[in-house]
Each structure stands twice: as C-alpha cells, then as structure tokens.
Image (tube, rainbow, N blue to C red):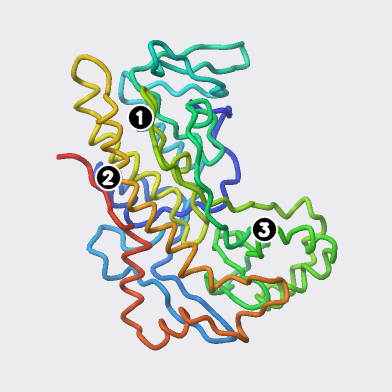
Amino acid sequence: MSGHADFLRDFRGDTVHPSTLELISELGWIEEFLRLPHTKMPDVTVNLGGQAVTFADFSRLKVRCPYIAFMPQWDVLDFLAGKAQAYPSFRLLRSTEATDLITADGRAVGVRATTAEGPVEVRADLVIAADGRHSTIRTKAGLEPVAGSPPMDVLWFHLPRREGDEMPFFQGGRGALISIDRGEFWQLAYAIPAAAFATIKQAGLPAFRERVAGLAPALRDRVEQIDSWDQVHQLTVRVARLPRWHQPGVLCIGDAAHAMSPAGGVGINLAIQDAVATANLLSPALLRPGVPSEDDLAGVQSRRQRAAQITQAFQLGILRDLYPKDLRDDTSEHVPPIFTAFRALPPLRHVMGRFIGMGVRPEHLAG
C-alpha cells in the first residue's frame, strides 16, 4: 500500500545501481526499462581543491549495465507497479496509510489503515514493513532501532542545466556539493554538518548562494535563482538499524530495518536486495500450509543484516572524512586520507566500483 495517490514526488536521490539494473535484466525487462528517461554515470569523480580523482569505476563489473542510471524514482515505481499488475494476486492500494497492526494469538495478522473513504483492514499471513526510516509498522511491532552518529545533513535544490555544462559528481571545499545531471536541470545536494541548517539560514541566502558558487563556479551565473528558502529542502540524515528485524507475523526490510546515509546513494538499492532475498527465502514458507515461522523471518535478517552493517560502517567511517565537520571547515585545504589513498592507488577505484555498484552481498532471482 502507498500513502499517496501517485508516485509523483521529488525523491531526490533517484539512483539505480548496477545491482538493481542486473535484477531488472534477469527479469527480462531491461530494454523496456532503459527506454525511460535517464542519464548514465559510469564512474564517480571527486574533486577537491581543483584535483579530480575517480573514486568508483563501474566499467569492469560483469553485468549488463556497468553504470549508475539516474532516473526519476516515480518512473521506476510506475514501471515496477505496471509489471506487477500482470499478476492476478497483486493489488496496490493507493492513498492508503497503515496506522496499526492487527494481532491475534500473539502475532500480527494484518494492518489497519486509513483511506479517503474511511478505515480499512487488510489481513495477511505476513506483514512486511517496507515503510521507510520512520516506519509506523516497526513502531507498532515494538521494534526499536539503534541510532548511529550521522555525519551530515543534506540540503536539496535545483538549478537549470545548460548545454555543455560539466561538473564533477562530488565537489569538496566549504561544504560538499553533489551534482546529478537531470538533463534540463541539476539536482544538487549541499552536504553540511549535522544540525547546521539553522546557522546557514541565519547567515542569509546571499551567503548560501556564495557557498554554492564557491564549490561550483560554473553555476555562479544562475545561483541568484535561489531566491527563497522554500526552494531548499533539508534532509535530516538518520543512520540506524534494528537489532531484531522481526516479530511474529512482521518483518522489516529496507530503511525500516536499516536507515542509510545518502552517501553513495546505496539506500534504495540495498532495500531492493532485501526484497529479493525476502522473496527467495520466504516464498516456500508462504506456499506451504500455515504461516512463516520466526525461524523463517530470522533467516532473512541473517542473510541481509551483515551487508547493511558493513555498508553503514563504510558510510559513517571511511566516507565521513569527505564531508565537513564544521561550517568553517574546508576539505580542499585539509585533504582527507581517503582522497590521498585513491590518488596514490588507482586500482582502488575498481574495488569501490564493485562495493558501491553491487553491494556487499548482491542478490539474484531464484532459479
């Protein structure tokens, strides 16, 4: 079920990694999928102090699509929902928001939800909580995430893209700017120290525009188009994971089980890997008489939790040096060790390409 009438919302990250593209290829849908509007990024370039280093190169991946595709997430979700409509048992409830669990004999047997027409109840042998980092179902199941220390917050905004524009994906300095080519515009993410947005707003829009232009001089001729804080959307980064992903009748996956930092854009792709593992491992249990056991649900967590833990440790540890810890910090003046390592050892870009592009434990369709 979806709490919205459609998928037309600004999801901002919108990265489809090689691991996800490979799954779509395994389903036989890749040619149709790639006809949707998208741009391709075959590597990740980081620029600090005028020096550019390739941090991740996907070209050596043994997959159908060795690149990250930037595609509006509403297009991705519409595509997948359309494919799912071919299955007679599939039903997508739109404008339907889960509010509580239905329990009987100590286990969840469905959910209560609100709709425009009034409340509804949906009964199920298994409730899968894929409702994000602020999961209602997780809370109602009594599952409490353990929070990590987020390295940053992110300010999202758009600026027009002009023909011939070229910018590195990641530009460090006074702050950090991630630039995503959307064809007609740049999707921009300005990374700041956690909880620093109030200080930035207090300094005023001219100072913010100067920060952006200082990181991306090519945008200096259009930063004046940021004329209201309403155009700047804050993402409060929350990194957390559940020690236990399940209760009788309930399983959490994706951000509901392990909220990720936006670093590397891996969140949605890790969630998709969770979903594939869940389908592969639980299909036999759902097809046999009865309901999935606690051991069945624990099997999903056992398979997927290590990948989430390693990815979060990578985001919070290795990558955090690329992001400023203070608004006065300038990473171009104090080059972080990870930048020096990748400049000295170019083969690391292929290792990072596999880590970001495929993840720790890529899943595949069951044979």
Three-letter amino acid code at disc 2? Arg
Residue drawn at the location 77% of the way across and 67% of the way down:
208
The residue under the point 53% across, 34% down is: 135
Which SS class for mark 1? helix
Residue appearing at x 40%, y 50% in the figure: 269
Q: How would you rate the neighbour count of disc 1 (Cα within 10 Å): few for under 14, some for 14-19, many for 20 or more? A: some
Where is residue 97 drawn, in percent x and y? 56, 24
Q: What amino acid is at disc 1?
A: Ala
Asked whether, in this view, residue 282 is left or right of residue 118, the answer is: left
Q: Nearer the viewer, mark 1 or mark 2?
A: 2
Quadrant of res 343: bottom left
- The residue mark sitting in front, 3 or 2, is 2
The residue nearer to you, when weighing 45 against 293, is 293
Which residue is tagged 3? 155
Q: Where is mark 2, residue-wise?
A: 303
Whole-Å distance between the Cαs marked 3 and 2? 34 Å
Q: Which residue is mark 1?
A: 84
Give residue 113's quadrant in the image. Answer: top right
Q: Amino acid at mark 3?
A: Leu
First reached walking from the N terminus: tag 3 or tag 2:
3
Q: Residue at x 78, y 58 (%)?
A: 198
Q: Is residue 244 above or below residue 357?
A: above
